Amino acid sequence: MRTGTLIVGASQAGLQLAVSLRELGDTTPITLVGEEPHPPYQRPPLSKEFLSGAAERGSLAFRKPAWYAEAGIELVTGERVTDLAFTPGGHPGGAAVTTAGREVIFERLALTVGAGPRRLAVAGTDLDGVCYLRGLDDAARLRARLSGARHVVVVGGGFIGLEAAAAARAQGKAVTVVEAAERLVSRNVSPVVSEFCRQAHERRGTTVLLSATVAAFRGERGRVSAVALADGTELPADLVVIGVGVVPRTELAERIGVECDGGIVVDAHARTNVPSVVAAGDCTVRPHPLTGEGRVRLESVQNAVAQSAVAAATLLGRLDNPRAVPWFWSNQGDVRLQMAGLSTGYDEHVVRGKPDSERFSVLYYRGGRLLAVDAVNNPVDYMVVRKALAQGATIPPDRAADTATPLKSLVSGTDVAA
């Protein structure tokens, strides 16, 4: 019997694709293959609730083990697909082989292989106590080490780094964040939000070093003891967390002729350039989800879920016109940053509220049109903008800063305000 769909990557995107196939009425066999030994689990809590001790392993699994068999989904964990070959003669499907020698025959193929941590190329990264944070095993090791650490250095001032720093500081550790750029989270937010993040972490006792690069990690008896910076500074450290971004996993896709350019290239329907092959999640680059312009890579739960649902429909021959507002969040201790839309290319921003109050929003515009919002401890503004973007509405920038006026009342262009 031929396998209907092979999904490579037991990620959130992979599981969602399988679920969506079943919800759309597909009854053919589905095989979901994952490299990690764990069934699909939630990743966002790893650097937040799990690292802080507020969540345990058991709470992270998406589904109970029995669910997979009940849904007719064969879940294969702890095995990596090492080879793929398509059926000769242009017929759909092919065969895949895993590290365990398992052969999986398929008619349709989905790649949800995710991304891996970007490695720092300096001396000493092999020292005990130098950690990356991407998967559950990484988080478990880091959590165990954190309990006995005194001096924690976080390399990278992006969301993962700041979330890890907040978790460590909440446990009373001496924490230093080392960021190579001139400001924190520089690829994702405006200077206003970057500066707020710096001040918020420093108010809570974390030291933040900007425009600072790591030259090497120093160690004693095989264990990290210090972080050496390019300017000669040495920071004491018995635990280092490296969070300098991720790299999409494209090796398998490239091997079978799928176009890759900073990720697996897909269209709005999650199609690759190879027939009957779709891709979804962190591994992909795709057209802007609202405008259809250019190519963007989105690392978010929302994109993984929405794009995987689209990919499932595509495999079943249903080409809908997908439109989904990207949204993200970052919990850094008691600071909750929620984002909706994509602010890339903005030419104007409006600050609504006072950053020092730790409750404010920043609305982004291009040509007077609303693009996105960053909301700090302000879920109301976040939801108003997210709904407005979903309906193609806008909010006049000359009135958005007035906190005495409810943001919802300013929405124009549709009936959102009603």
Image (cartoon, rainbow, N blue to C red):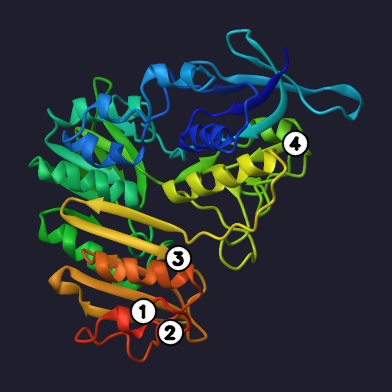
Residue 16 falls left or right of residue 397: right
266 or 2: which is nearer to us? 2
Local packing at callout 4 (Cα closer than 10 Å; few below 14, some 14-19, many 20+) is some
Dividing the picture into quarters, in which one does residue 108 lie? top right
Q: Given the current orientation, which residue lies at the most extreme left position?
A: 172
The residue identified by callout 4 is 276
Disc 2 to disc 3, C-alpha distance: 17 Å
Disc 1 to disc 3, C-alpha distance: 18 Å
Q: Position of residue 334 (x, y in %)?
A: 15, 54
Taking the spot 73% from the left edge, 39% from the top edge, the residue there is 258
Dots 1 and 2: beta carbons under 8 Å?
A: yes
Mark 3 is on which residue type? Answer: Gly
- For marks 1 and 4, the one nearer the N-term is 4
Q: Position of residue 401 (x, y in %)?
A: 28, 85
Give SS at disc 3.
strand
Q: Nearer the viewer, mark 1 or mark 3?
A: 1
Mark 1 is on which residue type? Answer: Ala
What numbered label is drawn on residue 412? 2
Would residue 157 be seen by someone viewing this image from the given angle? no
The residue identified by callout 3 is 341
